[in-house]
Image: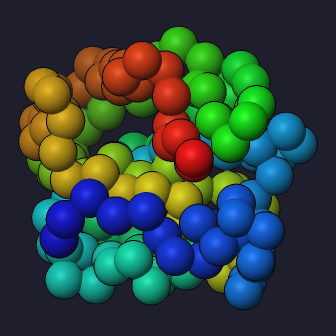
Amino acid sequence: MATVIHTDWLNGMLGSPTHSVIDFDTDNIDASLLDQTDAGTITASTVDYDEVDAATVVATADVSVSSISGGVVTLSGAVTFSSVSGDAADYLAVWKNSGTPATSPLAITWDSATTGLPVTPNGGDIVATWGSNTLVTLA
């Protein structure tokens, strides 16, 4: 799997929603660390979190959005996944948590980072720091 911007989320950001639109101003945004067993099933056309095999979720944490302006979504600081144990995490996904996986759209899934992916949990915290604190820029 390559790093992907999920098509339905991108269409929603561009004003042509085909499914659930993520409102970064009001929605609960989460990030999940995923292991590699889901590599063949998460693609740009993957729509909702229920399409991610639950067995691949290593950890989930809340994401804070600091601003949205001119097509730029800026995330606040870092995301801390607390007391993580289990399988190594190869991917980081950002998604809207509606409380129901079938209506929780995926935004972006990364399979690479400057440093840190994959990461092997040791029972401690895992901190994901956003590059330049920007999720994505649409121009």
Looking at the picture, does residue 121 appear above or below residue 5?
A: above
Give percent across and percent down for residue 113: 19, 36
Quadrant showing the N terminus: bottom left
The image quadrant that residue 57 belongs to is bottom left
Judged left or right of residue 14, residue 48 is left
The answer to whether one can see residue 67 in this image is yes
Q: Check the image and name the residue furthest to the right.
A: 26
Furthest-front residue in view? 139
Taking the spot 71% from the left edge, 20% from the top edge, the residue there is 66
From the viewer's perspective, is 50 left or right of 104?
left
Colour mode of the rendering: rainbow
Determine which quarter of the picture holds residue 45: bottom left
**Residue 82 in sight here:** no
Question: In screen coordinates, is 80 left or right of 39?
Answer: right
Instruction: Indicate the position of residue 3 as horizontal and vertical percent values.
Output: 26, 59
Which of the two residues, 86 or 5, is positioned nearer the viewer here?
5
Residue 24 locus on image (x, y percent): 76, 44
Q: Quadrant of residue 132?
A: top left
Can you say whether 36 is above or below 133 in the image? below
Residue 72 place in picture, x, y as percent: 63, 35
69 above or below 96?
above
| Residue placed most toward the observer, 9 or 55 | 9
Give the camera-side residue of 39 and 21: 21
In the picture, measured across the screen, residue 104 lies left or right of residue 50, that is right
Residue at point 85% right, 39% down? 25
